Amino acid sequence: MENDHIALNNAVETIADTFLKLPGADFRWELAFPDLTEEVVERLHAYGNEESFARGAQLYTYGDRRVDMFVVLEGEVHVFLPPVSGEAALYSRYKKGNFTGEFNLLNSQGSVVEARTVLPSTLLRINRVELERLMRTEGDIANVIVAASIWRRIGIVKAGSGSVVLKGRANDDQTMVLQRFFVRNNYPHRIETVSGELAEQDRESLPVVILSDGRLMSRPAIRELADELGITELPDPEKLYDVAVVGAGPAGLAAAVYAASEGLCTTVIEGMAPGGQAGTSSKIENYLGFPAGISGLGLASRAHLQALKFGVHFAISREVITIEQVGDAYKLTLEGGPFVTARTVVVASGAQYRKLTVDNYAKYENRGIYYAATAMESVLCRDQEVIVVGGGNSAGQASLFLSRIADHVHHIVRGASFSETMSQYLISRIENSDRITVYTRSEISALEGNPSLQRVTWVNSNTGERLVRDISSVFVMIGAEPNTGWLVNTVRLDDKGFILTGRSDGFDESPYSTSMPGIFAVGDVRATSVKRVASAVGEGSVVVSYIHRYLADHAKPVLARAK
């Protein structure tokens, strides 16, 4: 395919021009493909070794993990996207003063591109151990690498030519789950929708994930897929961490960033993707420092990058099954068998979505019933009527977001008003919108449709009035229940399952201490916590000071990340 190439400072040409320069695209070329100054390159020599490569030398290829970074001193390196049909497509060219690598420089994910020399070249090779040291000690250079890594990954994702293909039926619940996993983990992939009549055995095998080497994974579990793609960094059972954070929502990510930046060896265990419930929010407008608002996924991505920059280890797609005290440390057994050992544990496992008590409810989850209103879900309800259920800020944000896309939003709430549960700025906007109708003291009573949702009935509990609409998308945002099942008989919980903390319950002097020494709780999972993103971030950052005090009193920190 013919593509126009754009040179950046006479150094970089890229296939990305065809999609990143479209109207509305906001790709930061200068951040994705920076030219390093001679002074910076000279400083980088302290971390690498010069090597000579012949023309056509493969530096790394699709699926390679823990790839090295190469700085071009002489010659030229081309980076290729995975082949869709025929030959691989050129993504970018690196000449003198450029460096290779993208998001997988910050973790151990498998490479999603291939790099080869196209001229005899002299390259400065920086291996991963030295790269990690560089990221800790050269702050200005680390910022350049982080920015380039994420913007290059954005470009690769936008190219839509990932080596991984998700093949499934439209409106299929399992296909939606897998697509959400790819999107929230910023992993390049292509979608192939299967339509028409299928044989029974074909229907049962879908969705299918086709890997870069041609292998097929039929209806894979998230854990299996994450392991195969290298998204998960399985923990080293021989390693003793200073801090194990359970949950990568705002509270967990804040705790990880502050712990690692202060020299504590830190790992994060997360069942799905960084961001937690906040990661599914369409827009957060009252978070300090973002006057125009920011999506939950955007905020989570920034925090995830900060954590990676400071060397935090992430075990994505892993749930904690059990926790037990072993001497002065805790052993956390993860789903699938591996375990993590840490001197302290920060529980930031958040909560799981509450569900409506309506017949056939489970049948329509991800087939019309959703718990997040993001760009991915919005394409399913463009120019259609939709329903939002709930009286909190998340529900209000979802209504406003969907009102710009859907034909009309029916907002259902059990109470008499939003006044006690929603911020006033959201209430005012909802009341002033002619595309949102609020139904107070109302509840959904029936869901119908086959195979996906097609019709919804709701009833006013005061008047008995019954309304029926042909609606195929319902966004349920009625709160959540704490993810603390794995902590039963370990720490004290209240009658709703939230973790009891602080001096008022007779524990340590820290407001985040639990009934077990060395185990702390922050964010939504903690009893009496304020269920807001800002407060979760605050708790996650403050708890680290108490971790330092605990480690000073009970054990010497690992301090694996040199300050």
Image (spheres, rainbow, N blue to C red):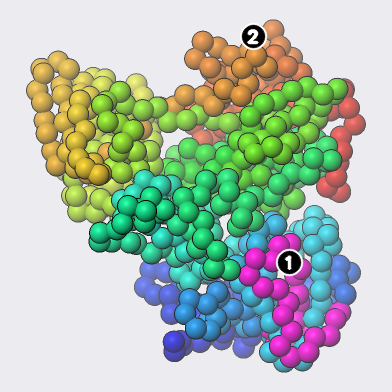
Return the x and y of residue 98 as percentages of the image width and height. Answer: 70, 78
In the image shown, does 509 or 473 lie closer to the viewer? Answer: 473
Q: Nearer the viewer, residue 440 or 79?
A: 79
Q: At x 17% / y 17%, what residue is drawn? A: 461
Q: Which residue is rendered at x = 69% and y = 56% of the image?
A: 107
Where residue 249 is drawn, which disc sits there? none
Going from N to C along the chain, the mark reached first, 1 or 2, is: 1
User: Relative to 464, does residue 562 appear above or below in the rendering?
Assistant: below
Residue 67 is labelled as: 1
Q: Compute the Cα span from label 1 to label 2.
A: 50 Å
Residue 193, how many percent across, how many down?
34, 62
Quadrant of res 536: top right
Residue pictured at 51% horizontal, 56% vertical: 217
Q: In the rendering, at what x and y percent does residue 186 appear?
A: 53, 57
Which residues, given as a range, are shown in magenta? Answer: 50-77
| Residue 527, image quadrant | top right
Q: Position of residue 89 (x, y in %)?
A: 53, 81
Q: Is residue 243 left or right of residue 162?
A: right
Q: Is residue 52 magenta?
A: yes
Q: Is residue 198 left or right of residue 1?
A: left
Find residue 504 and name its label.
Answer: 2
| Residue 440 occupies quadrant | top left
Q: Tell me: 528 left or right of 395.
A: right
> In front: 304, or 417?
304
